[in-house]
Amino acid sequence: MGKKEKAIGKVVLDTNKLVSALFFKGGLAGIVDLWKNGRIISVLSKETFAEFKSVLEYPKFSLTRQEIKVIIEEEVLPYFEVIEIADNIKGICRDVDDDKFIACAVSASADFIVTGDKDLLDMGKFRSVKIISASVLLKMF
């Protein structure tokens, strides 16, 4: 009887990595397997979810309302922990738009933020949250 492998911890995926993992076959698709198999606990806040939802509506993806609903309700929400922002973090990252990922990670006591964003990656760490690339995350498995 195969026992479920232990999750390595809580992870905040930035919007770009979340969308890339869902839509583009290749290396990043492995991240979807990690959250679906419970190997990582992926975390969203209202703020990071709102950004994700608005990106799904971009014309370049040509998704219908129904397709967006299915992605959210079948691929994301059943597997993600949605948290309230307890620690409102502002002015930490060079790009203020990225502060919501830091706030989400800190509020969730996440272990990692996974991003390709140079402004975040250059920080390396914020409090106890390590900021890593998707390839670093995938190498952990």
Image (tube, rainbow, N blue to C red):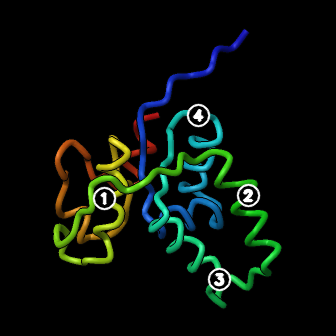
Q: Position of residue 130 (x, y in %)?
A: 25, 47
- Secondary structure, mark 2, is helix
- Secondary structure, mark 1, is helix
Residue for point 48% across, 70% down: 16
Chain-order first, disc 3 or disc 1: 3
Q: Pointer 3: residues within 10 angstroms few (<14), some, or many (20+)?
A: some
C-alpha separation, residue under disc 2 versus residue under disc 1? 24 Å
Residue for point 65% across, 67% down: 23
Label ID, residue 57: 3
- Secondary structure, mark 4, is loop
Q: Position of residue 95 (x, y in %)?
A: 24, 78
**Location of mark 2 (residue):** 73
Q: Position of residue 59 (x, y in %)?
A: 66, 90
- Report the amino acid beneath label 1: Ala
Q: Pointer 4: residues within 10 angstroms few (<14), some, or many (20+)?
A: some
Residue for point 18% across, 64% down: 122
Chain-order first, disc 2 or disc 3: 3
C-alpha separation, residue under disc 4 versus residue under disc 2? 17 Å
Q: Is residue 43 above or below residue 103?
A: above
Tell me how many marks there are. Answer: 4
Chain-order first, disc 2 or disc 1: 2
> Left or right of 28: which side holds 14?
left
Q: Position of residue 71 (x, y in %)?
A: 72, 63
**Location of mark 1 (residue):** 103
C-alpha separation, residue under disc 2 versus residue under disc 3? 15 Å
Label ID, residue 38: 4
